[in-house]
Image (tube, rainbow, N blue to C red):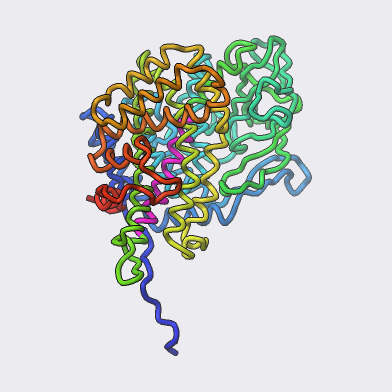
Amino acid sequence: MTATTHTVSNQVPPLVGYDVFAADLALTEAVQRHLPTELLAEARGELGELGRSAGSAQVQAWGVQANENPPVLRSHDRYGNRIDEVEFHPAWHRLLGHAVSAGLTDAWGRPGGHVRRAAGFLVWTQAEAGHGCPLSMTHAAVPALRTDPALAADWEPLLTSTVYEQGLRPVAQKAGVLFGMGMTEKQGGTDVRSNTTRAEPLAAEGEYLLTGHKWFCSAPMSDGFLVLAQAPAGLTCFLLPRVLPDGTRNTFAIQRLKDKLGNRSNASSEVEFDGTWARRVGDEGRGVRTIIGMVAATRLDCVVGSTALMRQAVAQAIHHCTYRSAFGGVLIEKPLMRNVLADLALESEAATVLALRLAAAYDADTESERAFLRIAVPTAKYWVTKRCTPMVGEALECLGGNGYVEESGMPRLLREAPLNSIWEGSGNVQALDVLRALRREPPALNAFLQEVGRARGADHRLDAAIKDMLTELADLNGIEARARRLVERMALVLQGSLLVRWAPPEVADAFCASRLGGDWGTAFGTLPHSLDLASVVERARPVER
């Protein structure tokens, strides 16, 4: 029987079956800009495969399944034996396996590895963000482990492997492993120096037993963890394996999994150590210094992850408005909607250009680039992750009521959006870290100013913003209370300088007019009407050119 009262029309086809990488001009141009010519063909091939997979119906279905079927804690087996295992939906393992095989835990040992991995992480996160946690932790563990060459020799080949093997076994029996991290405790949160977990040295050099708790421990089914504990000489970094070399389980009591706002596919846990064996990484009392390399790398992944959410949100919004008609025409041609979409596109491209610039600095690995990263990473982490939530919310609104419905995928993006601003140090922590670098590491500020100075003279609004920023930097009165304002200005100046150098004129002009020149309201969609907004929107449309 045909339903005469239910004719479906004016509906938007799903954004599926496309190459997520090739459809993103800002990203493809950044990869071409930052990779040596001899690496481009291979990198484009890898990223194209990943992009087509991320945009496929199959992988998008995996993302839905992994979030609709969140992980479950199995504390005991059927006989009452404590096993402390987390059970994931098969879609989670498929996503994670594909990501590992694509090299998303391998950046440190291959030419252009950080740019290639960051681009891949940005592409693949658009399919599903939750499994990015173990990918990020595994990738980021490498610099911390390199403080102990013997540990690095044993673990790094497994961390950077392209083989994903689920299940807990001795690492000697596995071709690839994943890592997690445990720093946060109940009484201290971000203030890790107040940690109370104890580390008691054993007779064997570098071996300890840990006793205490971790309020947040990421990726609890990982093969190993970097954790902080109080040794006799102070806070120290340790490598804690889930399975000991003889095949027995290390004491790792998972008390519960966190019931989170978003990031539902990923298991974040609360764990207890009670005589848990661990190996020291670095010197006693130098735990924060040892693990800081891991923290910096995961902070960059927070930037890249938020950039991915922003890109997917703006892609969905522009795609919807390309097909949806209202008031006599398609939405994308309506001047006010075009203003909103252009504003969202600017935010997305600025984040993309900045994220890939930071990845390129890791690849260069020169003294000046390391100094640049010292300030640029917390600055970018503060600003890009902060912008993610309002931007995704505005993109959801572009779909109207359709965007508020789970089937659209937009609610999942919105729930995920605040995450990266909180993980690896929230906004105040990042702002204070920038102040710390400004006070203690003059080369870092010099490197930052050299970077933004490369665009001086190209746009009068950027020049004025740089001048204002220097004035703020010279005034130390009430600097801590002004830290967020200062870091926001630094981030916008850095983004503006990169766009002026590398983006099309219409993008750079719109960014400088609004974000630096002050010709902007307090909500998205308030760009000057005289700008070339149609070109900005078309550039961000998710189609292959």
Q: Nearer the viewer, residue 416 or 336?
A: 336
Q: Quadrant of residue 422 in the image?
A: top right
Taking the spot 57% from the left edge, 48% from the top edge, the residue there is 262
Q: Farthest residue to the bottom: give it.
A: 1
Asked whether residue 438 is drawn in magenta, I would say no
Q: Nearer the viewer, residue 245 or 192?
A: 192
Picture coordinates of residue 357, whole percent (x, y): 34, 29
Drawn side of residue 224 relative to residue 401, left or right: right
Taking the spot 48% from the left edge, 56% from the top edge, the residue there is 410
Picture coordinates of residue 325, whole percent (x, y): 34, 69
Q: Which residues lie in the magenta part?
A: 297-319
Asked whether residue 306 is drawn in magenta, I would say yes
Drawn side of residue 289 relative to residue 502, left or right: right
Taking the spot 34% from the left edge, 71% from the top edge, the residue there is 327
Q: Quadrant of residue 300 in the image?
A: top left
Q: Is residue 205 visible?
A: yes
